[in-house]
Image (tube, helix red, strand yellow):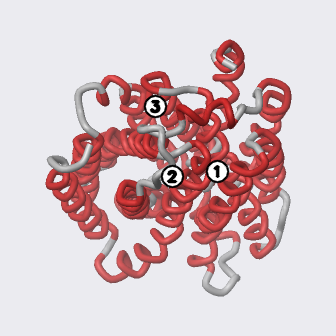
Amino acid sequence: MLLKTNSFLVKATLLLSSSLTVMAGATIAPALPAMRDHFAATPNADYWVRLVLTAPALFIALGAPLVGTLIDRFGRKPLLAIAVLLYGLAGTSGAVLNNLGLILVGRVLLGLSVAGIMTTATALIADYYIGAVRAQFLGFQAAFMGLGGVLFLSLGGFLADVNWRMPFLIYLLALLILPLVVFVLPEPNQAADAPNSGIDGTDVFPWQVVALTYGAAFLSQIVFYLIPVQLPFYLKQLVNANASQSGLAIALATLFSAGSAIAYKQIKTRLSYMGIYAIAFLSMAVGYLVIGVSPTYAMVLVGLAIAGTGLGLLMPNMNVCLTSVTPGSLRGRVLGGLTTAFFLGQFVSPILSQPLSGAVGLDVTYRLAGGLMVAMGAVALGLGWRWW
C-alpha cells in the first residue's frame, strides 16, 4: 500500500475531504443576521436561526459513534463516498428552501455527512501512515481544515452581503471532490496494518488517555464556537460590522490556526502532548481575553489571531495521541468518539452562551471563556509531569 498511499492524489483527496468538515456549520455564520431578519416573523427567530448554524454539530456528535463502528466493521471508503455526496446535496438545500424547519432538516443531514467524512478521513490517515509521517500528515489535515475555513468563511461573508442564501452554495464543492474519493483512495488492509496499530502492539484500551482527550475536546469546542456563533453579533454591536467584515474576522482565526497546525510536527519533537495542550489552552485564553476587552475591530483581530494559533495545535495533538495509543481494530470507534466530543461541544456552545451573553454581555462572555482556558492550561501544566 505504501506506493499508493504516498501518491499526490491520495494525499490531496484526504486533505480536500478533511477541509469540508470542521467549519461546515460555520460557513453560513456571516449570513446569520440577515437570515434572522428574513425570518423575523417566525417565533423565537433568534434561537432557531442560531440552531441552523449549530444543528449539524449535534448530529455529527450523534452520528460519529455509529460511523466509527461501521468503518471498523465494513471498511472506510464506501462510507466516505456516501458522506461526501450527502454533504453536497444536504448542504446546498438551504439555498432553495423557503421554510426554516426544512432548512433545519437539511442541516441535520449535513451533520450526519460531516460525521462520516471527519471520522473516516482521519481513520484513513492513521491507517495509511505511521510515526512521524502520521504526525506530520495529521498536522496538514488540521491545517487544511483551517484553510477550508478561511476560504469558506471569507467567501461566505462576501456572498452573504449579496443574499443570505448564497453561502449555502459553497457546499457544492463536495461534489467536485467525490470522484477523487471514488477513484483514487485505496481501501486499507486492516489485517496488514494491525501490527502497527497501537503504541505498544497490544489491544489494551487506554481509558485514561481517551477520557482526558474527549474532555479537552468538549470544553475547548464550547469556547471555540463562541467565535462563529457570537462574533458577527459582537462585531455588529461593537463597530456595526457588515457580513463580509465578520467573515474575514472569523477566517483570520482559522488562518492562524492553519499556520500552527502545519508546524505541529516540529513542535511535537520538542514538547510532550501535555506541553502542547498547555500552550494551546493558554494561547486561546490570551486571545479570548483580548477579544473581550477590545474597543476596536483591529484589536479583535489581534485576539482572534492569538486564539487561532492555540486552536490549531489542539486537533493534531488529539488525533496523533489517540491514534498512537489505540489498537487499529478500535481506531474508528475511538476517533468517532472524539468527533462526538468535538461537535457536542460546538452544539452546546450557543445553548450556554446565549443566556450568558444576554445576562452579562458578549464582552464579559468572551472574558469568562478566556478564564476557562486559563484553568485548562493550568490543569495541563499540572498533569504534564505525569503523562506523555
Give SS at disc 2. loop
Q: Residue at x 31, y 48 (%)?
A: 300
Binning the other alpha carbons within 10 Å of mark 3 as few (below 14), some (14 to 19) or many (20 upward) gives many
Is residue 379 in sight in this rendering? yes
Mark closer to the chain start, 2 or 1:
1
Real-space Cα separation, disc 1 to disc 3, in angstroms:
31 Å
Q: Amino acid at mark 1?
A: Ala
Residue picked out by circle 1: 160
> Residue 185's x, y, as percent?
76, 28
Disc 3 from disc 2: Cα separation: 33 Å
Q: Residue 135, how many percent across, how many down?
A: 44, 29
User: Which residue carries the number 2 mark?
Assistant: 242
Q: Is residue 94 left or right of residue 190?
A: right
The image position of residue 250, as x and y in percent, is 46, 47
**Residue 139 badge:** 3
Q: Is residue 99 above or below residue 152?
A: below
Q: Nearer the viewer, mark 2 or mark 1?
A: 1
Graded by Cα atoms within 10 Å as few (under 14), some (14 to 19) or many (20 or more), the crowding at tag 1 reads many
Image-based side of 88 in relation to 320, left or right = right
Taking the view exactly as shown, the residue that stands out farthest to the front is 202
Q: Is residue 283 above or below residue 113?
A: above
Amino acid tagged 2:
Asn
Q: Is residue 89 above or below residue 58?
A: above
Q: Residue at x 44, y 33 (%)?
A: 258
First in sequence, mark 3 or 2: give its number.
3
Q: Residue 47, located in which quarter of the rendered image?
A: bottom right
